[in-house]
Image (tube, rainbow, N blue to C red):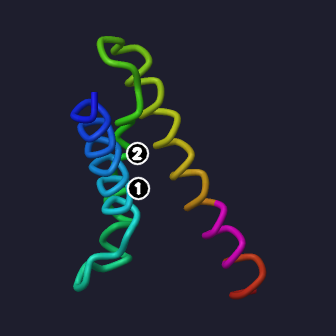
Amino acid sequence: MAEDRHAKAAEEARRELDRLKDQSDVLGASAMARAAKKAGAHLSAADAPEGDPAELWGRRIGRGLAVLFVAFLIWWLVRTYILA
């Protein structure tokens, strides 16, 4: 009985430590590198359901088009309001 409680508490502590490790900054790790890794995972549709290629490629195409639209919008705004 006491061993079960101890095992449950130890497992909960491990999960909490893993969660904190994921959220904490590691000395020497760049915030830009983490942001780039997160953006790469987002654009490659890492969050898409497994085994559904239509969903995977739909997300990739949609996110790629969104990036192109934002780049065009920035270019247009700079050309129109800054360089004009």
Query: Residue 21 location, x and y as percent?
Result: 31, 62
Numbered label attached to residue 71: none
Taking depth in this image into account, of 72 and 84 the one nearest to the observer is: 72
Is 31 left or right of 11, judged from the image as shown?
right
Q: Residue at x 26, y 30 (%)?
A: 4
The amino acid sitting under disc 2 is Leu
Label 1, label 2: how many angstroms apart (C-alpha)?
6 Å
Kindly state the secondary structure of the residue where label 1 is placed.
Answer: helix
Majority SS type along the magenta span: helix
Percent coordinates x, y for residue 16 in the rendering: 37, 52
Q: Which quarter of the rendered picture does the N terminus lie within?
A: top left
Q: Is 53 drawn above or below residue 30 in the view shown?
A: above
**Vertical comparison of 17 with 57: above or below:** below
In which quarter of the view is residue 3 placed?
top left
| Residue occupied by mark 2 | 43
**Circles 1, 2 touching at the beta carbon (< 8 Å):** yes
In the displayed structure image, the side of residue 83 where residue 60 appears, left or right: left
Q: Nearer the viewer, residue 58 or 28?
A: 28
Residue situated in front as seen by the camera: 79 or 11: 11
Residue position marked by numbered label 1 in the rendering: 39
Q: From this viewpoint, which residue is outermost toward the front?
A: 1
Q: What residue appears at the point 66 percent right and 61 percent down from the top-left corner?
A: 73
Residue 77 placed where, x, y %? 72, 72
What range is drawn magenta here? 73-78
Query: How many dots with numbers?
Result: 2
Q: Residue at x 40, y 14 (%)?
A: 54
Disc 1 marks which amino acid?
A: Ala
Q: Residue at x 38, y 24 (%)?
A: 56
Q: Nearer the viewer, residue 74 or 76?
A: 74
Q: Is residue 29 above or below residue 3?
A: below
From this view, report whether residue 69 is shown above or below residue 79: above
Circle 2 — which element?
Answer: helix
